Image (spheres, rainbow, N blue to C red):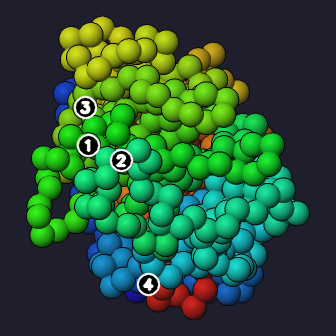
Amino acid sequence: MDLSSWNAVGRIVAEHNSSEIKAVHEGQKDQPSFKEDPRNPDLAKAVLREVVHLNAEGKAGEVREHFDPAHVPFIPELERGVTGLSCCAILGSDEFLVLQGTAFSVTSTWHIAGDQITAREPLAGFVWSRNRRFFLTLETDGTLVVSKSYGSEPLDRIPSLPGSIFIPRHLPMDLRSKFETPGDTAFFTHLAISDDGKKILLADYERGVILLTRSAADWESQLLFPSLMLGLEEDMRAALDEDHGFRPYCDMIHAALSPDGRFVALGTQMDDHHVLRLSDDGRSSVYASLECLSSYPHDACFSDDSTLIALNSCHFYGGATLVCSLSAICGLNVQREQQQKVQTVLNDYLRVYASGYLPASMAGVDQGAFLLAGAGFATCVTPSGKVLWEIEFGSSAGSVDVCPETGRVLIASHSGMLHLFDPSKRQDVPIFAGYRAPLEERRWLFWDRLERPIVW
């Protein structure tokens, strides 16, 4: 099969779609008019065979000299079954960690060093503190480990959390008898650790949101959701059934911890955006509650200095993101008119699956910028609403990691692709759609049908 048209055809599509995105971001159009990628699955399979062959010969670094990466032509391949990537981390200048699978499935943990990709002891999750001083890992049995970096000597080990601590304290006895005791198995979808390493936030898809705070003696837990201060008693009394127990509604649960450990933002599909204030000992109080811009809360992200918060709500595969100064929203309680006075709309089309924050050194602007990764696209936008860049990566994001030390951004995707970007460099020749698109230095394919992961 003649593969010579692969790059030329893909670049024509990328050039057109990039010009459409530019027209929208620079105010010349309201909506982009995208061109479909016409490259067929047979051509994609033939290209993939060549890429696999080059990897097998130890020539992974030469792949892009011959073939541009792509997403759309491989969709039929992806539909055959791919285990997506749910977690990623930059460990060094050429070292990475990625988790394949989710909290509800068997996972694989891959360590990347240069062109070498090695399977490691399976983990259920991991995350850096924002200042990169602490690395938190979640083992498959639910044990939490705090260390200075991946693989280093543990600073702390926290046993798996029992379901009993997810029962709200001070629940009236008539309600406590109706509250179903959660199971002991962890399904953590969001992990965070504060910059001082003394607070850990965990969002469990079935049990709720828990905060762990390091005391002089040990780690103490506090249940943040479900909770009486967020209306649990009212919800239970409205839903009580003589014949059935009560389980809190946790669909689309998410939570974020401010880097300084003073605030938590959380939400679920049936509620509003909630911001909680934390004391030094981890006690919490409601700081503000904000109404969604679209259907229901889906993601939250704090700025590096813990003064700003971006809140995303989704509507099907679209959504909207607002940003507020934390000092400006103190005491707000879902008052739309007041909220509009203190918010800026960052984005009005992405359902954000993963987010991060680029410091000034990476954003190129003093105020830094939020990175919002959604379905197919990631956009980098300042707190004032200026889009710095946007890039198409194809599928829904599973995780992002922003590393000021290396100046790189890593995006893990549910397509089984891992993307490494350098925001300081631009894509000279468009090979996929974007606006002032950053250079994708590399991507990796973790596809079930491949004998081993490959570099592209």
Quarter of the image for residue 96 reads bottom right
233 relative position to 5: left or right: left
Marks 3 and 1, how far apart at CA: 23 Å
Q: Nearer the viewer, mark 2 or mark 4?
A: 2
Name the amino acid, label 3: Cys
Residue 78 appears in view: yes
Give the SS element for disc 2. loop
> What residue is shown at x 69% (from left), y 56% (from top)?
136
52 relative position to 354: left or right: right
> What residue is shown at x 33% (from left), y 16% (from top)?
332
Please tell me how crowded label 2 is: few (under 14), some (14-19), or many (20+) other residues with Cα within 10 Å: some
* For marks 2 and 3 on the same chain, the one whose residue lies earlier in the sequence: 2
* Residue toward you, 361 or 127: 127
Name the amino acid, label 4: Ala
323 relative position to 250: left or right: right
119 relative position to 330: left or right: right
* Residue toward you, 394 or 49: 394
Which label belongs to residue 292?
3
Q: Nearer the viewer, mark 2 or mark 1?
A: 2
Q: Which residue is mark 2?
A: 171
- Locate the N terminus by quadrant: bottom left
Name the amino acid, label 2: Leu
Which label belongs to residue 233?
1
